[in-house]
Amino acid sequence: MAKEYDDETTDFWVRFPRTILDKFAELVRGDVLNIGSGPGRDGLLLRDRGLNITCLDASEAMVKICIEKGFKAVLGDFNALPFEEGSFEGVWAYTSLLHVPKREVAKPMSEIYRVLKSGGVFGLGLIEGELEEYRESSGVNLPRWFSFYRKEEVEGLLKEYKFEVAYFEQFKVRSKTYLNFIARK
C-alpha cells in the first residue's frame, strides 16, 4: 500500500506545523539519513533546504518510490543500519520509531547514535500517549505497530543514549499530540 500511503500523507506538512522540520534543517548541514522514510515525504522538504538525503525504509515499495523521486534510497531496518560509524551529520526519524515496540527501541537508538558524527543532529517525532498496539492509520487498512510516549519518557530515552536535547515542541492535531525533539550527539 506504498502508493496509497504516499497519496494519503503528501500534504502532512501543509496540515501540520513545520517548525520542527525547519529547526532541524537550520541546525544540520550535509548528509542526513531519513530513517523510516516511507515514500520520501520529509526527504523532499529537507532536500529543498539544501540537505543531502539518504532514505532508508524496510519496504521495497517505499524504497522504489524514493528512488523515483531522485533519492539515494536503501532497503534496511532500524536495528542494523547498513552504514559506517559516523556517516551522517543528521538523522531524521519522524514518526518512524513509533513503529518499534518500546521493549525493542534500544537497538535502533544505539544504531542512530552509531551512524551520527560527533555533534550530529537527531530529529525525532513521536506521538504522545500510553498506547502500544497494532492499529490502522493514515488511510492504510493494514494494521501497523504503534508505541506512543510521554514527554518525560522520551527525554529519559534520549538521555540514556547520550543525546542532549537542543529543542522541543509539541502540537496537537485532531486528537493526537505530537512530541518533537531535536537532540545532539
Image (cartoon, rainbow, N blue to C red):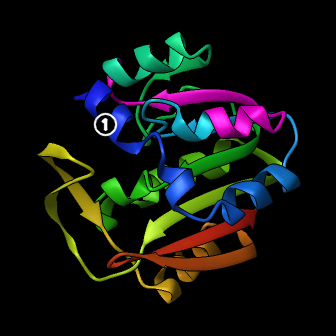
- As displayed, is residue 15 above or below residue 52? below
- Badge 1 crowding class, 10 Å Cα cut-off, few under 14, some 14 to 19, many 20 or more, is some
Name the residue at 61% across, 16% down: 72
Name the residue located 42 percent from the left edge and 55 percent from the top edge.
97
Task: Locate residue 33 relative to residue 79 in the image: left or right.
Answer: right
Task: Count the labels in the image.
Answer: 1
Query: How far from the left and from the top, in percent, is residue 46?
Result: 71, 39
Point out the stretch of residues depicted in magenta.
44-60
Q: Where is residue 140 in the image (x, y as percent from the top left)?
A: 19, 43
- Dividing the picture into quadrants, the one containing residue 9 is top left
Kindly identify the residue that appears in the image at 48 percent across and 51 percent down: 12
In the drawing, does residue 92 fall left or right of residue 99?
right
Can residue 141 be seen here? The reply is yes
Q: Quadrant of the C terminus?
A: bottom right
Tell me: 21 left or right of 152.
right
Tell me, yes or no, whether the highlighted magenta stretch contains residue 59: yes
Q: What element carries label 1?
A: helix
Identify the residue shown where x is 58% and y is 41%: 42
Q: Which of 56 and 85 is in front in this view?
A: 56
The location of residue 76, given as percent across then percent down, is: 42, 27
Which residue is most to the bottom? 152
- Tell me the kind of residue under disc 1: Tyr
Describe residue 25's horizontal placement relative to residue 128 as left or right: right
Comparing 121 with 143, the one in front is: 143
37 inside magenta stretch: no
Q: Quadrant of the N terminus?
A: top left
Tell me: residue 91, above or below residue 119: above
Q: Where is residue 71 in the image (x, y as percent from the top left)?
A: 61, 18
In the rendered image, which residue does mark 1 sit on? 5
